Amino acid sequence: SKIRVVDDIMPDQTRPYGVISANVRFPTLKQLGELICSSLRSGGFAVCSGVRPWERSEMISHYQGHGFELIQSTELKNWAAFVFRKNM
């Protein structure tokens, strides 16, 4: 299997992705939640960073509302990062 790196705001794709990584601020991650969900295959992973610790709970709730399970989260130097798995 190949790894394809796409440097774009979620271009049209012909098939769902297995992994999507996004390092942008929380408001943008929130806006992209539905698009990330629809672009991932079932069991796929979303790796998200760019979230401040005080936004952490809202980020987790928002992505869980789109059918994601939180696999891991970490904080470093006042920034938070997450790994979610799509459960649909």
Image (cartoon, rainbow, N blue to C red):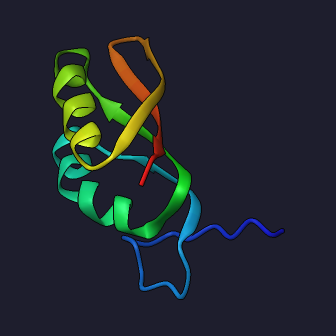
- How many numbered markers are drawn? 0
Is residue 37 rendered to the left or right of residue 59? right
Indicate the quadrant containing the C terminus: top left, top right, bottom left or bottom right.
bottom left
Query: Quick check: 22 above or below 15?
Result: above
Q: Residue 22: x, y in percent?
A: 43, 50
Query: Quick check: 86 above or below 61?
Result: below
Q: Residue at x 20, y 31 (%)?
A: 61
The answer to which of 6 and 63 lies nearer the viewer is: 63
Q: Which residue is drawn at 80% across and 69% down?
A: 2
The answer to which of 65 and 12 lies nearer the viewer is: 65
Q: Residue 52: x, y in percent?
A: 25, 22
Q: Residue 9: x, y in percent?
A: 36, 70
Is residue 55 rendered to the left or right of residue 42? left
Indicate the quadrant containing the N terminus: top left, top right, bottom left or bottom right.
bottom right
Q: Residue at x 37, y 42 (%)?
A: 68
Q: Residue 23: x, y in percent?
A: 41, 44
Query: Quick check: 27 above or below 5?
Result: above
Q: Residue at x 24, y 22 (%)?
A: 56
Quadrant position of residue 65: top left
The answer to which of 70 and 76 lies nearer the viewer is: 70
Quadrant position of residue 64: top left
